[in-house]
Amino acid sequence: MLDLKLIRENPDQVEAALARRHAGFSIREVVDIDQSFRQVQGEMEALNRRNNEISDLFKTGKVQGDEKEKLRSESKELKKRQEEVNEEHRRLEEALQTRLLSIANAPDPSVPDGKDEESNQVVHVWGELPQIESPLHHYELGADLGVFDFERGVKIAQSRFTVLMNWGAKLERALMNFMLDSHSERGYSEVFPPIMVNRKSLIGTGQLPKFEGDFFKCADDELYLVPTAEVPVTNLYRDEVLEEENLPILHCAYTPNFRREAGSAGKDTRGYIRQHQFNKVELVKFTTPESSEAEHEKLTRDAELILEALKLPYRRIILCAGDMGFCAQKCYDLEVWFPAQNKYREISSCSNFGDFQARRANLRYKPAGGGKGRYLHTINGSGLAIGRAMAAILENYQQKDGSVVIPEVLRPYMGGVSEIKPASSGKSQAVSIV
RNA sequence: GGAGAGGUGGCUGAGUGGUCGAAAGCGGCUUCCUGCUAAGAAGUUGUACGGUCAAAAGCUGUACCGAGGGUUCGAAUCCCUCCCUCUCCGCCA
């Protein structure tokens, strides 16, 4: 949520910043509503004041006889008008609030211009692309290795649900543990939150009210399956005032994530990279405004270190203003190399939200030098999407015979197994080369 | 699921329909005092949104005692609805 005062005082500046998103966000309406809202509030307060005066007269016993009746009827009269004014006030407040909640964050000045992904810029590229002759897709390899069972996933749930079998299940778990351990060592404290959350939490991190149809919602309870650990973890401190000396707070969390993928029809229909349910380790930071930029860089770097440890070729791109998510003021995507697709695909998205989420979720801190609570800054990023990491490993580590080498850092998490092989029976086997 | 208790300021906790933004204690802040630590004394201390002001301070208005309604000139206090928390019982990994 943008600062209403900022909008009120610098409407043109805010409007210009939002225009960079090319998404039709306009604050003109907000400015108008705000103006009438404050006017009506003035009227409402005047009525209240008079009413308070009247009851004060009764209180001090200064009125008697006739006077009392007169005041009573005046008060009744006031009340009628109050009802109308209150109704208007309420209506305007709600309108203002929903408008404010539906306006995206203003892009940071360092974010490049552009309308869509065409204008995203490569920041740097890491790793050497593997030389593989006619590489197989991860889902082809995975089917032979017996690590994915796509058909049964559909049978027991729906399309875009996949069952991991055997070494697939183990690899997924290995990735999860490896990532959590790595981040813990780097100072992120681990959190394992609820994976169902209430509406307030989703409003706090910006998914609602604008993206209502994107999430799975329980029919009989006001609860949603989390689309990302960002939601429960960021909302941990909702409506709290933290101490500056405890900042920055760094958390890492594993959760499954659930997304309806509305609007993705036809995209990535094969394979494991766009699922309704997928696993992810998320990094979340709470910082002061002064340090958020540096912490954002560090967090992005922490995500990259996972890719480097797995020896997966990747590149970092900075999203242009038009391609950034709703809440972000600045965002880097990490893209990992998929040999069979012959391109880089997103595996992590690391965003600085400034005080946008903090304002929504009422996340504040008390400055060390004293003074009023200030909104803190929130930053988060995937560290990493586990399913995509697994798919990338299958493709990048594939051998001529259809076997797949396990990245070294994962072997301790896989019982020392260094390679998985397809078997004629269709069941995968593990071979220890060490 | 059944029965009961309760939601008040950063925390604990009192509160008779008006003098209650709300006692008291703790904590926080400021000052004083004792050579240090600790203790002691006095004062001060809610938030939001408006108005005034170049701005801050100050002053000032309104709202806020879980949420929303109702009764009343007037509600933390009475009534209704909802939400949440806790305890006991049942069920359960």
Image (cartoon, grey):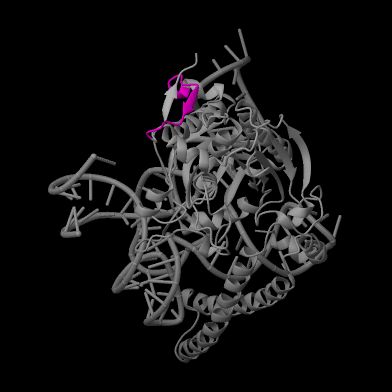
Inspect the magenta stretch and tell me whether residue A349 lies in it.
no
* Above-or-below relation of A245 to A381: above
Give how far across and how far down residue B58 sits, in percent: 71, 56
Between residue A169 and residue A110, name the one nearer to us. Answer: A169
Between A99 and A159, the one lying in front of the other is: A159
Q: Is residue A203 visible?
A: yes
Q: Is residue A30 shown above or below A179?
A: below
Residue drawn at (39%, 60%), measured in percent from left and top?
Answer: A218
- The residue at the point 46 percent across, 37 percent down is A144
Q: Depth check: give the residue in front, B14 or A408.
A: A408
Residue extending farthest to the front is A424
Q: How many marks?
A: 0
Whether residue A403 sits left or right of residue A301 in the image: it is left
In the picture, residue A409 is in which quadrant? top right
Query: Along the line of sight, which residue is nearer the eye, A238 or A102?
Result: A102
Q: Main secondary structure of the magenta part?
A: loop
Magenta span of residues: A413-425
The quadrant of the picture occupied by the N terminus of chain A is bottom right
**Quarter of the rendering containing residue A247:** top right
Left or right of A4, for residue A55: left
> Against A184, is A366 above or below?
below
Q: Residue at x 55, y 54 (%)?
A: A204
| Residue A416 located within the stretch drawn in magenta | yes
Is residue A387 visible to us here?
no
Q: Position of residue A343 (x, y in %)?
A: 69, 43
The picture places residue A240, in percent across and down from the top left corner, at 53, 46
Residue A31, horizontal then vertical, whole percent: 73, 71
